Amino acid sequence: MPNDYKLFNADCFDIMQSMIDKGETVDAIITDPPYSLDLSGRGTNRISQSKRKQIKDLTFVSDDFDYERCFDLFLKICKIPNIILFCSNKQLSRTMSWFENAGLSTTLLVWNKYNAIPACNNSYIDDVEFIVYVRGKKAPYNNDAPISVKHKLKTYPYPHTTIREHPTQKPVELIKELVQLHSFTGQTVFDPFMGSGTTGVACMENKRKFIGVEREEKYFKIAKRRIEDSMKQIKMEFLNE
């Protein structure tokens, strides 16, 4: 496997502990851990039923995770704390508080999914996701990145079903923004909850090294294919220049 990326079909806690034992570090962590979600009560109209059908496969990523253990490992793996975490509304307060209590700066970013299904049964439409940025002193921050990627509000459509290969897949362009801003060319980005590999694809397209972990074999295979396809495309473009 090329030196540009390392992929593991394993439990991320095992991989992170192994990295720590070996003294391996990364420059940034960009990841989308399992959410704490309420998947019930979406109404009975046609749009609500469509939304319920869309989320029925979310159970395996909706049962939360051992965040205290996970965040502690993150701080041991990152050379300087430089962490981008997607999280649910229920996880937001505890995530920011945990890192702030560790003496770190946190910033809240928001992804606006302007094409979200307008299903709301006594609740707001599910058209945003929260992103917590954790930064230690002198963490990588690319001031030369375009001003367009420095907005706290990220407006991108939710990936269409024709291209979506994971129930919580993020837009590649959104993750590319985060990769460009929070790392430099040649640095290593880590995603312990890799899913379908979008962070890896964004890293390949931005000349970053990537380490990814995915426990579910089905999605690991998808991630591996997407990242390797991205590498092949980049090589073809280089040869055609």
Image: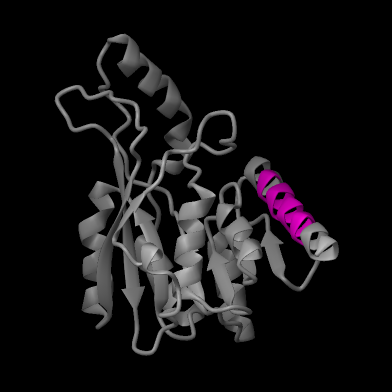
The answer to which image quadrant residue 153 occupies is bottom left
Q: Nearer the viewer, residue 162 or 136?
A: 162
Q: Residue at x 35, y 40 (%)?
A: 113
Q: How is the image coloured?
A: one colour
Return the residue found at the far front. 241
Q: Is residue 228 magenta?
A: yes
The answer to whether residue 213 shows anywhere in this view is no
Tell me residue 201's x, y (percent).
63, 56
Q: Quadrant of the C terminus?
A: bottom right
In the displayed structure, would residue 11 be above or below residue 42?
Answer: below
Q: Nearer the viewer, residue 11 or 151?
A: 151
User: In the picture provided, is 102 more to the left or to the right than 208?
Assistant: left
Q: Residue at x 68, y 44 (%)?
A: 222
Q: Nearer the viewer, residue 23 or 137?
A: 137
Return the residue found at the far bottom. 138
Q: Quadrant of the N terminus?
A: bottom right
The answer to which image quadrant residue 150 occupies is bottom left
Q: Main secondary structure of the magenta part?
A: helix
Q: Is residue 11 magenta?
A: no
Q: Nearer the viewer, residue 136 or 94?
A: 136
The answer to whether residue 49 shows anywhere in this view is yes
In the displayed structure, would residue 93 be above or below residue 136?
Answer: above
User: In the picture provided, is 17 more to the left or to the right than 71?
Assistant: right
Q: Residue at x 43, y 69 (%)?
A: 146
Return the residue found at the far right. 239
Q: Which residues are magenta?
A: 222-234
In the displayed structure, would residue 238 be above or below residue 193?
Answer: below
Tell me residue 168's x, y (percent).
47, 41
Tell me residue 211's x, y (percent).
63, 67
Tell me residue 93's x, y (percent).
20, 59
